[in-house]
Structures are given as C-alpha cells and as structure tokens.
Amino acid sequence: MKKLLLFIAIAMIGVVASAADQTKEQFLAERKAAVEKAGKPFNEKTAAAAFDKKDINKDGVLSAEELKPKPAAPKKDAK
C-alpha cells in the first residue's frame, strides 16, 4: 500500500511539473486570445519573437523557469 501511494505521489509530481511547460504553438494561441480579447490586433511575428527570446535553451518549449517573469531593472535616481 505504501509503495502504491508513493508511486501515485511521484506520478502526480511529474504531471504537475510538466504541466507548466508550454510549446510555441500553445504560447502563440494563448497570446493571440489575450490580445484579441483586449480588442487589439495580433501580430504573430512579434509574439513568435517574444517566445524565442524567452526560450533560453532553444528546445521549442518554455519551461516553468523560462516562463518566470524577469525582475525589473533598478531605476536610477534622478538628481
């Protein structure tokens, strides 16, 4: 019974971890839906370039790490 529960827990962790991965097609579809919902025209070339910039290892899939927003650059104090 313990082995079965352990197996199920490991399988669930694997599913959750892979659920964060996003292919280029998924990224473009999600981006298109969001832009069109906002009433703006969708530019596929711009969205594809954004995907390529985020895809650090160039494997065609955005991992959870690659999907994390980058921290904003610190603002310089104007004096």
Image: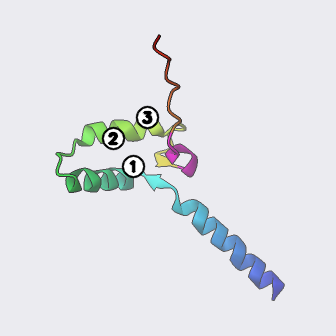
Q: Which residue is mark 3?
A: 53
Task: Indicate whether 12 appears above or below 24.
Answer: below
Label 1 Cα crowd, 10 Å radius (few <14 / some 14-19 / many 20+)? some
Q: Secondary structure at mark 3?
A: helix
Please tell me which residue is depicted at 66% across the width and 67% down the height of the picture: 13
Q: Earlier in the sequence, mark 2 or mark 3?
A: 2
The residue beneath circle 2 is 48
Lower position in the chain sequence, tag 2 or tag 1: 1
**Stretch in magenta:** 63-69
The label number, if any, that marks residue 24 in the structure image: 1
Which numbered tag is attached to residue 36? none
Q: Going 33% across and 55% down the picture, which residue do you hit?
A: 30
- Mark 2 element type: helix
Residue 14 is situated, as x and y percent measured from the top left of the image, at 64, 66
Residue furthest to the front in view is: 79
- Given contact means CB atoms under 8 Å apart, are the residues at marks 2 and 1 in contact? yes
